[in-house]
Amino acid sequence: MIALKPDFCDVSLPESDYSMEDYASSKARWCSGCGAHTILNSVQKLCKEEQLTPEKTVFVSGIGCSSRFPHYMNTYGFHGLHGRAFPVACGVKFRRPDLNVFVVTGDGDCCSIGAGHWVHAIRYNMNLVVLLFDNAIYGLTKKQTSPTSPLGTISNTHPTGSVLPPINPIQATLGLPNVSFVAQTVDWKPAHLHATIKKAYEHQGLSFVRIVQRCPVFMRDTYEPTVSDPDAITVLNHEDGILLNEKTLNSFRHIVEHDPSDIIKAREKAEIVKETTPIGLFYQNENATRYDQYGAHNLGISTDDRLSAINTLMDRYAI
Amino acid sequence: MSNTSQTTHSEKVNQVKRRTTTEAIVEIVSDSGEGAQKCGQSLGAISAKMGNGVWTVEIIPAEIQPPARSKAGASGIRVRMGTNKVTNMGDHADIVVALNEQVLYGRIDQNAYKSGTILLIENKWATHTEETRLAYEESIDRFKELGYIIHEIPMEKECLKHVSDARKGKNMWVLGLLCNIYDRDLDIAANQIRYVFRKKKEEIVQSNLNLLQAGYEYADQNIDMHFTIPSELSEEEFVVMNGNEAVSLGVMAAGMDVCSMYPITPATSATHAMAETIESAGGIIHQAEDEIAAIGFAIGSSYAGKTAVTITSGPGIALKTEFIGLAVMAEIPLVIVNVQRGGPSTGLPTKVEQGDLLSVLYGAAGDAPKIIIAPATIEECFHYIILARKLAESFRSPVFVLTDANLATGVQPYPRPKIKSEWFAAPIDQSPWKEGLRAFDWDSETGISKRPIPGQKGGMYTLTGLAHDEESHVAYDPSINQQSAENRSRKLAALGQTLKKPIVNGDEEGDLLLVGWGSTLGAIEEAVGRAREKGANVSSLHLHFLSPLEPGLKEIFGRFKKVKTVEINYSDTIGDPLITKENRRYAQLAWYLRAHTLKDIDCFSNVYGQPISPFRILKMLETELDLILIDEQ
């Protein structure tokens, strides 16, 4: 952090000017080539661009490879229980509107053991950025089928191939009440990834971002074709969507127009995941009910008023 | 009826002879939805307002609408009123008002009545359908055989003189009847009715007042039992409520920012009681999607510096266990109220049990020391929440408050607490974190450390459930795990140092010491008092701190020939098939105290789902001490 005293020069400078390094903590211990490294870099870049005050920023995670994320940020962090990042993050945010809260979760964490909380967190629609690191496999426990593993995935629990179709996290989220922001990106397109995370940060409400993520150790064969094939990705484009510069946009072969205010169309677009990987903003609604606003509505009541409220109730029991 | 003598008259009634009694136990039993509880709660409140000691306990069926006129459907209330303070439900009922005869069978099975108990029974069933009429007649004969004294009362008929639908208001007619029988002040009774129906239209209030008056006059003219229970009005202000309501007020008086819960019997009514007020008192209720989320949300709030409580019962605790372990490991202050009910599994949702002591003590992976306290009275249900919040903050630890279904629904007056602003949690510290101080800077003497709150500049750390060092970094060195476990455990020892040796009720040494915890206090002390009057050499001791345990127990126990716990949970009985002294499974506190003191502590416990009565304890003492302690009835 560069801190210049106000009398050092005439021009007014911001009180603090955080650099990328100010947000970095210990060296990330993910495997070499893991998509999580790119995401970490992008999030630290976002923090710098938005000049997020490190002590006012909290990263909450569950358990899994992705959930090590808070340890690598020099902010407040909460590396809790498997599947339970959502309730913790909602509790952090409920009565602390001054905090920037991010949720980092994985496909097992969010879509399997924590699926109940996922449903309700979407409905609560607190102002959180949710990053779903979806590598379609359990990595930390060494290659078990995840709820988003493609049908037929060979894993240690299904050596002859997984037998159930995967959950589509985008489609599932779009089916929930009070949903307010749903986007998808891939870790290997850093410009799109960053633009998506930025859009998610700017959204007022719960921004659900599924990041299709490479696991080079356990899922190399699954992702290699997608990463190398320019036909494998389709960009959802719109002036209200994820804004890319012309050069980046033109680097994609398949671009379709999609208005993110149209939830019916968003659900249709979520279905094409079977043929291609759609990336971009599926849906946004800034008017959805915000439960964190309810949580903050009665902050700052005076001591006298609090005493008076309790005494009034106590009067009812008086004899 | 005990302790009676021929004396006074009432000013309210003409020439009625009243006998003075120092206490009375009344039950009102009916089908669900007939308002028996409202009637009994009102009688309790009226008596408390007259300066009498009161304890009421609800009789709750498992279903919302159980079948009418059935043994399992008994819904009602017991009210014990006395000249002095009343601390428990007592033994057998003196007078029972039954809106049908079938519901009495469940109570008879529970040994709630004795030979000589007076039953006032609705007589409309005697002229009902043939099947009902026969059942009624058969029951009346059966009750007579059991030695009960029967009065058949035309309740429906009398009510229909005042209302078109007797279901609406029969309970208040019964209240009037009981007010006459027990010389309750009619003005106070009328005010109580106005309070109970404060949200209703004036015509409904008036109709209920008319029924109260009618019931009162009916008893005056048609019933030949009239008592008075002398009382002394205290100068001190009193409040009257049940344990869940006391918990609820405690939550607000402790300045809790967040009460995070999921509906579960018998805990939920604590949340109902605060729902209308808590937002004006600075807090909010969060009804979570499940028990796990409820505690996770509370932990998140607490991590962010907002004080939090979660209120549940045994099955909820089972679901929350992983998060409780996290709160211990990551040293997150949190108050967890467990309103215990019968277990295991769904068990007896509406009935009392003290069955969760060992599960909250040990029910987490690894070594998870936490603070456990148990209020024994309604008043303590209030004050212990405030204490729990302070302990949670001071010791950076989850704190359990163990109440139970008996305390939750038991109603008792207690001195009105004067709410103090210093009971509220202090505003969260947002000053810069002291340079050089680590996130877990464990004090080597106490294990206590100061915690950083998000927003504190320079205090950034990542909380983790993994083994971690002082800086909250993941421990790759095994010695760190040993060291951090030592520090978490040492906090309990540090708290234990501040506790006082418990006070023995009765002689400091003797033949037998009864040890209890939680809601059994009143029954144990009453039984011990009655036994001592008969010359029994018995004392009692009641524990309020269960983790850490109060100091000096081994020394106190050593002064008695025998020590025996009294608990509402399961234990094997020696002599039952296959059960020996060697393989016997002990009641939970006994088990714990045996390990703690290396004394051969016995236990008296059962899981009938009922509060333990002084009578049952006296029966046990008779066997234990080979004395006759109960008067012939």
Image (cartoon, coloured by chain):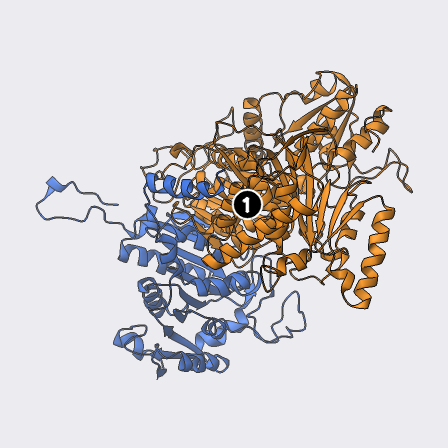
Chain colours: A blue, B orange
Q: Is residue A220 left or right of residue A254?
A: right
User: Which residue is at the front of the view, B620 or A247?
Assistant: B620
- In the rendered view of the protein, which quadrant contains the N terminus of chain B? top right
* Residue at 53% from the left image edge and 35% from the top image edge: B384
User: Which residue is at the front of the view, B535 or B566?
Assistant: B535
* Residue at 84% from the left image edge and 37% from the top image edge: B584
Residue that badge 1 annotates: B326
Q: Is residue B278 left or right of residue B151?
A: left
Which percent across, then down, holds residue A305? Answer: 34, 42
Q: In the figure, A80 relative to B335: above or below?
A: below
Residue A41 figure quarter: bottom left
Q: How many marks?
A: 1
User: Which residue is at the front of the view, B428 or A227?
Assistant: B428
Q: In the figure, B196 relative to A7: above or below?
A: below
Which residue, as the protein is rendered here, is positioned at the far left? A10
Which percent across, then down, holds residue B198? Answer: 46, 52
Q: Is residue B480 visible?
A: no
User: Which residue is at the front of the view, B541 or A47?
Assistant: B541
Q: Is residue B391 left or right of residue B403?
A: left
Residue A50 figure quarter: bottom left
- In the rendered view of the protein, which quadrant contains the C terminus of chain B? top right
Which percent across, then down, holds residue B359? Answer: 67, 43
Mark 1 lies on a secondary structure that is: helix
Q: Is residue A306 visible?
A: yes
Are there few (<14), some (14-19), or many (20+) residues within 10 Å of tag 1?
Answer: many
Q: In the figure, B366 relative to B447: above or below?
A: below
Which residue, as the protein is rendered here, is positioned at the far front? B15
* Chain that bears disc 1: B
Which percent across, then down, holds residue B187? Answer: 51, 42
- In the rendered structure, which amino acid carries the disc numbered 1? Leu
